Amino acid sequence: MAKRGRKRAAPKGKEEEGGTKPQAESSKPITKAKRPRRVEPKPKPETEYFEDRRNLEDLWQAAFPVGTEWDNMDKLRDINWKFSNLEDAFEEGGVLHGKKVYLFGSTEPQLLNVNGESKVTLIPVVVAVDMPFPPSDKIGIKSVQRVEEDIVPMKQMKMDWIPYVPLENRQGRIEGLKSQIFTLGCTQRRSTLKLLKTERVKQYDYCIPYFQPLEAQDDEEDTVVNILFPIEPPIVCDFDWELDELEDFCKDLIENETLPEDKKDEFKNYVKEQVRERKAAQRQAREARRKMIESMNPEVKAAFENMKLYKFYPVSTPDTPDINSCKVPFINRYYGKAHQVL
């Protein structure tokens, strides 16, 4: 009987060669199906509502605030002033509707309660001149240090009457506007002020809207002169040549140790010279007015006689200080008082 031998093990690797090859693993990883992520719907943005711009909204800002220091210009924006009364004046039924009007701005410093704090605040004011032609092409320059004011052409100070176009007409034709509005504008750029001499910059601080009234101004018959005697410290006072006797006036200053006794004669001569200059200026003003009236066209004269002045203050709003007690009709020494304060 034949010996049954043990079955020899197949060489390593043969089974793989002769037998069935194991299924090759896929190169792509098997991924589980992802569940779609739930996306929360975005809330719809709330509709923003912007207040419609009013047709004359920037009219008061177009009127240059004459005589306001350049450093204080930006302070006018610290308070949200509103001039809806000025805008309403040009609407149908308003005092300026359908008229030719010339506007200039100014500021009046007042102690106001602003957000619970008492502080000196510049109140913007707009004056409307109702007449068929510009009231003047000149500007006055006056300061505390100057005895007499200078009257110079507006163009010398880069100022002029500029047509104002309402917002709704700025993209189209401007013919046929119901009212003709001109504002006193200034083309002097603030960015170039640093290139100007200090004296030139200061001239803008002392500008006053000017026109030549037909009637004499109160100060043309005034007998008071402002004295600024140049010593150290300077003597600043008023002298009335009708009421004050110069000798007694000097004696009082010496007794009060305001005037050194060795400067008495010099001071007296200075005062006499100021009085002479003031009287001469008054005579010249009277003569200039007389000649102007005599040579004036009757229509022009009638326009000045019928000229109306309106002074506008900001309207009261919840976020502006109370200025009701600050309203006055006085405009300036040239224009005098307004016919109506609004």
Image (cartoon, rainbow, N blue to C red):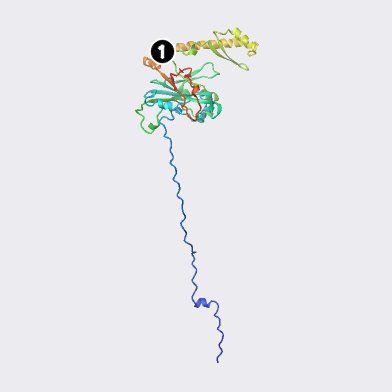
Q: Is residue 224 above or below residue 136?
A: above
Residue of label 1: 293
Residue 335 appears anywhere in the view: no
> Is the C terminus in the top left, top right, bottom left or bottom right quadrant?
top left
Q: Nearer the viewer, residue 256 or 299?
A: 256
> Is the N terminus in the top left, top right, bottom left or bottom right quadrant?
bottom right
User: How crowded is the residue under tag 1: few (<14 C-alpha within 10 Å), some, or many (20+)?
Assistant: some
Q: Amino acid at mark 1?
A: Ile
Q: Quadrant of residue 251?
A: top right
Q: Provide the secondary structure element on which disc 1 rests.
A: helix
Q: Quadrant of residue 54?
A: top left
Q: Nearer the viewer, residue 172 or 30?
A: 30
Residue 237, percent from left and from top: 58, 14
Q: Nearer the viewer, residue 29 or 39?
A: 39
Residue 253 appears anywhere in the view: yes
Residue 104, percent from left and from top: 45, 24
Q: Quadrant of residue 57?
A: top left
Residue 60 horizontal side relative to residue 250, left or right: left
Residue 266 horizontal side relative to residue 201, left or right: right
Residue 276 horizontal side relative to residue 184, left or right: right
Residue 117, percent from left and from top: 56, 28
Residue 50, percent from left and from top: 43, 37
Count of number-bearing discs: 1
Question: In the image, what residue occupies the spot 51% across and 76% down?
Answer: 16
Q: Is residue 302 above or below residue 157?
A: above
Residue lying farthest to the bottom in this orientation:
1
